[in-house]
Amino acid sequence: MIAADRIPFLGFHMPFPAVGFVEKQPEGFRYIPKSYQFDV
């Protein structure tokens, strides 16, 4: 559901950045971290 609806999630014991999204792959799922880069 979080992959289909692109709902962000937080992983408490994950390396920085622990906020990201899940993407469906043919062989399973992939974690996509949220970028903290600012556009200047």
Image (tube, helix red, strand yellow):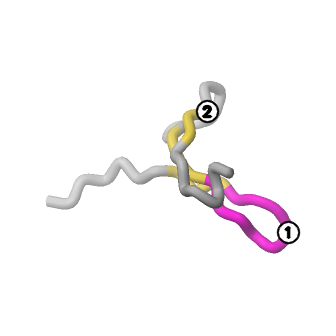
Q: Is residue 34 left or right of residue 18?
A: left
Q: What residue lies at 75% left-to-right and 69% top-to-bottom?
A: 25
Q: Is residue 10 left or right of residue 30?
A: left
The x and y percentages for residue 39 are 21, 60
Q: Which residue is mark 1?
A: 27
The x and y percentages for residue 10 are 56, 34
- Point out the image quarter for the C terminus: bottom left
Q: What residue lies at 65% left-to-right and 27% top-to-bottom?
A: 13
Residue extent of the magenta highlight? 22-30
Residue furthest to the bottom: 26
Secondary structure at badge 2 equals loop
Circle 2: is it few (<14), some (14-19), or many (20+) Cα within 10 Å? Answer: few
Q: Which residue is mark 2?
A: 11
Secondary structure at badge 1 equals loop
Q: Amino acid at mark 2?
A: Gly
Q: What residue lies at 24% left-to-right and 53% top-to-bottom?
A: 38
